[in-house]
């Protein structure tokens, strides 16, 4: 695992965009795993800017999102379908038929979960999976206690996650209780993983992810076992880390930067 510390949220997003654009230039037809949430807003802004400057193209990219709420219309402002349209899909050249977001509606949710897994498999697997992390250490919506070998399925949200998402729904009472989400095992099969975290509220989760034991009570901690995992955090999120880690400026100034990315 490579841990890289940015001075602030803006630098974190820019560095993450640099990493993703670099990977796309190396493999224009890559399969990209995408995430949603407040942390990702600046990251997608950076990617859109890079596309508009001609730094990268998404014309051959296939994307798979991690999750979606159950029984929430795709047109709802808080749905992840809406999030992706507003922040990314409508602003770049990715083909709509290559954008895959789990279907959380209908009477056959288990079939939808299986279809998402099969779609990833048919595409050749995820080349690069982008992740955020919850305050309780969840990745995707794999809450504490989730199986570290889990696949895409239906999960009930924890009270902490419901509270964290309450602002998007004008109160906790309106937050959907269930989601369809990629499993921890699904995430771990990606060839590269890029996890982003910002702010003091994520500091305990980052400490547990990076320096704590691997445990299902902190699902993100399994990334310690991934052969190519990159954790990019700002100084606020890194405040509880005790080890010595790379900083953005050091990585960008390294004449062997290309080898850095290939050898987590």
Image: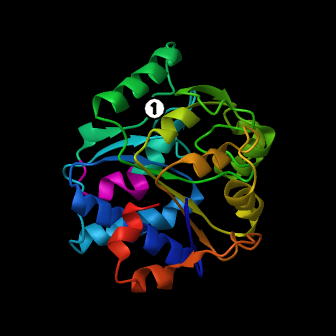
Instruction: Answer whether residue 7 is magenta in the image.
Output: no
Location of residue 98 with respect to 52 vertically, above or below: above
Which residue is tagged 1? 102
Q: Which of the pair 6/141 is nearer the observer?
A: 6
Task: State the residue at coordinates (57%, 36%).
Answer: 184
* Picture quadrant where residue 65 is located: top left
Dot 1: element: loop
Task: State the residue at coordinates (67%, 45%).
Answer: 138
Q: Which residues are magenta?
A: 85-94
* Picture quadrant where residue 206 is located: bottom right
Instruction: Answer whether residue 90 is magenta in the image.
Output: yes
Task: State the residue at coordinates (67%, 42%).
Answer: 219
Task: State the residue at coordinates (75%, 33%).
Answer: 145
User: Looking at the picture, how far across and down is residue 103, in whole percent?
Assistant: 45, 28
| Main SS category, magenta section | helix
Visible in this render: residue 215?
yes
Location of residue 117 with respect to 101 vertically, above or below: above
Location of residue 151 with respect to 57 vertically, above or below: above
Residue sticking out furthest to the top: 107
Visible in this render: residue 57?
no
**Colour setup of the view:** rainbow
């Amino acid at each position: 695992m490579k841990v890289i510390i940015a001075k602030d949220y803006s630098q974190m997003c820019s560095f993450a965009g640099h990493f993703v654009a670099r990977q796309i230039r190396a493999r224009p037809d890559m399969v990209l795993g995408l995430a949603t949430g407040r942390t990702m807003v600046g990251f997608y802004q950076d990617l859109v800017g890079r596309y508009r400057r001609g730094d990268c193209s998404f014309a051959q990219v296939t994307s798979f999102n991690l999750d979606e709420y159950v029984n929430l219309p795709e047109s709802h402002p808080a749905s992840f379908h809406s999030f992706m349209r507003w922040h990314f899909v409508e602003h770049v050249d990715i083909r709509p038929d290559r954008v895959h977001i789990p279907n959380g509606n209908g009477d056959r949710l288990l079939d939808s979960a299986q279809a998402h897994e099969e779609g990833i498999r048919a595409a050749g697997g995820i080349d690069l999976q982008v992740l955020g992390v919850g305050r309780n250490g969840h990745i995707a919506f794999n809450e504490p206690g989730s199986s570290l070998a889990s696949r895409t399925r239906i999960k009930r949200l924890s009270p902490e996650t419901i509270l964290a998402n309450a602002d998007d729904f004008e109160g906790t009472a309106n937050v959907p209780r269930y989601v369809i989400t990629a499993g921890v095992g699904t995430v771990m099969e990606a060839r590269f993983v890029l996890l982003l975290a910002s702010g003091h509220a994520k500091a305990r989760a980052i400490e547990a992810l990076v320096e704590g034991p691997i445990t299902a009570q902190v699902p993100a901690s399994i990334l310690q076992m991934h052969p190519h995992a990159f954790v990019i955090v700002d100084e606020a999120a890194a405040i509880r880390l005790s080890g010595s880690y790379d900083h953005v400026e050091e990585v960008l100034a390294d004449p062997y930067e290309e080898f850095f990315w290939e050898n987590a």
